[in-house]
Image (tube, rainbow, N blue to C red):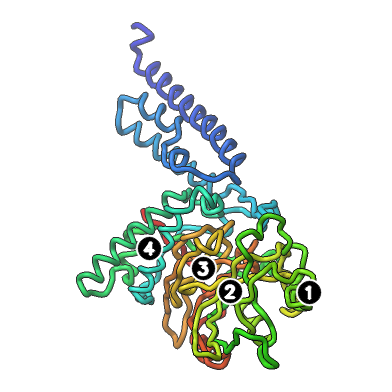
Amino acid sequence: MNILSSPKFRFTIGCAALLFVSLASSHLYSQSKTKQLAQQNQPFTQPENSAPLPSQISLTANFQNPFVAQQISDEIIDKQNLLAASAPYPVVDEFKKYKFSINGSQVVSPAKLPSSKVNFNQGDLLTVLVNTRKYFQDYSSEDPDILRTGMLATQGVTVPDVLNTLNFMIAVLKEDIANNRTTRLQDPNFINTNFRVIKWSAYNPKNKQQKQLRITKYAVFTHPGSKKKTSTFNIPIYSLKENANNDKFYTRYTKQDVLSGIYEPGGKEFGKVTTLAYLTRNGLEEAIMEGTILINFTDGYKAFFNVDRNNGMSYIRGLKATAQKRYWYFREVDAIKGYGYKIDAKISIKPGVTFAGDVLNIGLGKVVVIEHTQGGRKHLRMGVIADTGGAFLPNLYQLDFLAGVFNNKKEFGQNISQLPDYATAYFLVKK
């Protein structure tokens, strides 16, 4: 008998071929993964993230038996997902300097939403989704920070995935609102069918036992103010002029320097900034903390004012507000504003459907559902990460929920008393 035609010999050769293919795919994938990790801090682009790996194409194409080809392909994909989930993610601060690394599988993992209605205002969510998508469309080249995939890269999530999620949700909401029906996005079964649900376990380097996200709340407060300095309204808020970037003079001065009167008549920098309004000291601190303030002027005029640029000094966690050196300059705006690389580009946001978070390490435009139990029932609330702040860089254990516009802290406290301090969080990514 010819040894080449021996069934035993053919079986041996076949096993050897499969073993060789498996080893080759592992080697090629390792090379690809090493290159990917080396580029972790570089902006992701659609061609790099949407194309299949070369090893996957070449190996499956070389098999004439479609069943064997599919089996090998599935094994490669499973191995890729497993390695990606366990890959380290380098966490950066607001200056994009490396701080520490986390293991992806410890922070994000596949999950399903519980069977409770998801709560949100349909029109407001649609507005924030549309405005966030428009920011990607208009400012991706000017603001490469939004092209960072953040820690969800360990789950294979790309920026195109984020945009696909926004596009799909916008289409569903528009169709449901046009047909005057409760949107399908409030149905957990619809979500579990059409989205990857990824659970976010909090990672707090100072409290390794924390598993749920801390949910803080912020608001826009209405404050009285004056266009002229008075005995009551004696704390100014300023706007930088268009030429302020030429010498960056404002980066030399702390909040305490500014409040000492350097920009007021007789001050050494008088005339370099524009005075927008005068508030109480409490009004100033709340405006800086919340990012936006609604001022009721003594002459009857009302307007929103939003933080524009700061003096480049870091926010220090745990230090009382009046002792912080960071100072913010403001601009008048037409709505509550969220994230944006400059004041004219900031995303217009709505209360009840907006979260502020760590945009560099989590990513702009991520859709999040938070879950908490109240009165023995599970409650789900959906929102978009469309804002950020100094307290979130870096921060993988907290989100700040935009609660609304309030006249005072008491009214604000009554409103948020029904909201959780800690919650289980899920990302939604269109399948």
- Residue wearing tag 4: 130
- Residue wearing tag 3: 338
Q: Is residue 422 above or below residue 165?
A: below
Q: Residue at x 52, y 34 (%)?
A: 29
Label 3 CA crowd tier, 10 Å (few <14, some 14–19, many 20+): many
**Left or right relative to 146: residue 121:** left
> How far is disc 3 from disc 4 in space, using C-alphas?
13 Å
Quarter of the figure with the N terminus: top left
Q: Secondary structure at mark 2?
A: loop
Q: Looking at the rendered structure, which numbered label has been put on residue 291? A: 2
Q: Residue at x 44, y 64 (%)?
A: 367
Q: Is residue 214 above or below residue 130?
A: below
Q: Is residue 387 above or below residue 256?
A: above
Label 2 CA crowd tier, 10 Å (few <14, some 14–19, many 20+): many
Q: Secondary structure at mark 4?
A: helix
Label 1 CA crowd tier, 10 Å (few <14, some 14–19, many 20+): few
Q: Residue at x 66, y 66 (%)?
A: 310
Q: Residue at x 54, y 30 (%)?
A: 27
Count the marks.
4
> How far is disc 2 from disc 3 in space, using C-alphas?
8 Å
Q: Is residue 213 visible?
A: no
- Residue wearing tag 1: 267
